[in-house]
Image (cartoon, rainbow, N blue to C red):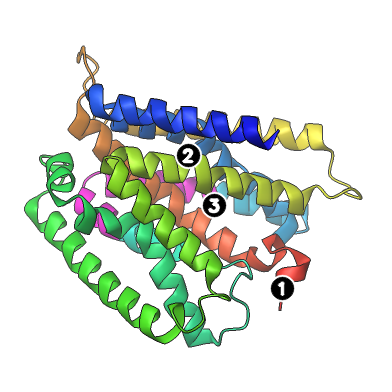
């Protein structure tokens, strides 16, 4: 079984690498597809997490409504200032992708925050350093020069943070920090081998989102769960559909209905704003439920 899984993994990696090298916009299409499928489902699971954080039905309904209203308002506002959306998305991503879930529980608060910044920044800051030419070409015409400079400034800050982490914790405590090392080195390998968009699509669609879905499912539906799985699936499907509708509405601000081919710049602006609008409430809820989502043996 392990041999079959490894063969399948190598076959998928080989196919993605071939597509990335031979098919124009393969990375963008991969990111769009993973966002519209596993990405939206991973966000829709917030509808299942809400009852875990809020017990009363009135509270759940209120928070659910507030959640979607916040997404709509943020999407509408940020669509006019894509550079601001990008800056907010980058900072939220560093925090979100670095969520420890108990994997470095022996650290103090400031040690944990430093590790979180080092790990969480890898998926979004590494392309600035490992694929600068492709990175610049990808964002040409998508955001103004000021936005690119801002990303570079954040990348410098992250690089300094990573250097401090390596000297203080990463190398001296390599064994206890092995999960952090796996994530940083894994992202490094992705950005060395693939284009920036394809690398992030693989990270988000094949690692972050599936692992989050599995984590939420394991936490919400243990053997003694009182929540009907069929009901949860229906809620997730409905939430995903609503998210699609909101994403389609936001797309009207970026994509011309008369366009016969995909406009890469417009598609990337849509992704940036959509990710930013959806990540804000998602980040808050996941932070509130972080302990609940951490396996019991990893909790403090």
Residue labelled with disc 3: 66
Quick check: 179 above or below 250?
A: below
> Does dot 1 land on a helix, a strand or a loop?
loop
Choose between 119 and 59: the one closer to the eye: 119
Choose between 158 and 67: the one closer to the eye: 158
Q: Residue furthest left?
A: 145
Residue occupying the point 58% across, 76% down: 176
Q: Could you tell me which quadrant the C terminus lies in?
A: bottom right
Give the image location of residue 178, x and y in percent.
Answer: 54, 68
- Which region shows up in magenta? 66-87
Sequence-wise, which precedes: disc 3 or disc 2?
Answer: 3
Using residue 268 as the reference point, say whether residue 226 is left or right of it: right
Asked whether residue 255 appears in the rendered view, the answer is no
Give the image location of residue 75, x and y in percent.
Answer: 35, 45
The 10 Å Cα crowd at callout 3, few under 14, some 14 to 19, many 20 or more, is few
Residue occupying the point 53% across, 85% down: 109
Residue occupying the point 62% across, 83% down: 106
Q: How many numbered discs, if any?
A: 3
Using residue 258 as the reference point, say whether residue 214 is left or right of it: right
Front position among marks 1 and 3: 1
Q: Quadrant of residue 236?
A: top right
Q: Quadrant of residue 248?
A: top left
Residue occupying the point 45% across, 44% down: 204
The answer to if 31 sits in the magenta stretch is no
The 10 Å Cα crowd at callout 2, few under 14, some 14 to 19, many 20 or more, is many
Residue labelled with disc 2: 205
Residue labelled with disc 1: 299
Sequence-wise, which precedes: disc 1 or disc 2?
Answer: 2
Q: Residue furthest right?
A: 224
* 3D distance between C-alphas at marks 3 and 2: 27 Å
């Amino acid at each position: 079984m392990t041999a079959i899984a490894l063969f399948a993994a190598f076959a998928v990696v080989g196919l993605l690498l071939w597509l990335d090298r031979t098919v124009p916009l393969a990375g963008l299409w991969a990111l769009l597809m993973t966002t519209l499928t596993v990405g939206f489902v991973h966000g829709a699971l917030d509808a299942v997490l809400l009852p875990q954080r809020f017990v009363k039905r009135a509270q759940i309904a209120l928070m659910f409504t507030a959640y979607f209203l916040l997404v709509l308002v943020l999407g509408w506002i940020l669509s006019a200032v894509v550079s601001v959306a990008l800056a907010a998305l980058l900072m939220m991503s560093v925090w979100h992708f670095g969520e420890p879930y108990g994997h470095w529980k022996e650290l103090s608060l400031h040690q944990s925050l430093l590790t979180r910044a080092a790990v969480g920044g890898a998926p979004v800051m590494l392309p600035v350093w490992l694929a600068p030419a492709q990175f610049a070409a990808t964002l040409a015409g998508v955001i103004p020069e000021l936005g690119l400079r801002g990303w570079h400034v954040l990348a410098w800050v992250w690089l300094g943070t990573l250097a401090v982490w390596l000297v203080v914790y990463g190398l001296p405590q390599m064994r206890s920090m092995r999960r952090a090392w796996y994530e940083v080195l894994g992202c490094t390998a992705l950005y060395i081998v693939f284009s920036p968009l394809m690398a992030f699509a693989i990270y988000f669609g094949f690692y972050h989102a599936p692992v989050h879905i599995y984590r939420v499912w394991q936490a919400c539906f243990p053997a003694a769960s009182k929540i009907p799985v069929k009901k949860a699936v229906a809620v997730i499907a409905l939430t995903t559909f609503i998210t699609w509708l909101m994403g389609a509405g936001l797309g009207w601000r970026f994509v011309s209905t008369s366009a016969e081919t995909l406009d890469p710049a417009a598609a990337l602006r849509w992704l940036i704003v959509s990710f930013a609008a959806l990540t804000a409430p998602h980040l808050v809820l996941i932070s509130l439920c972080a302990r609940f989502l951490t396996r019991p043996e990893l909790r403090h």
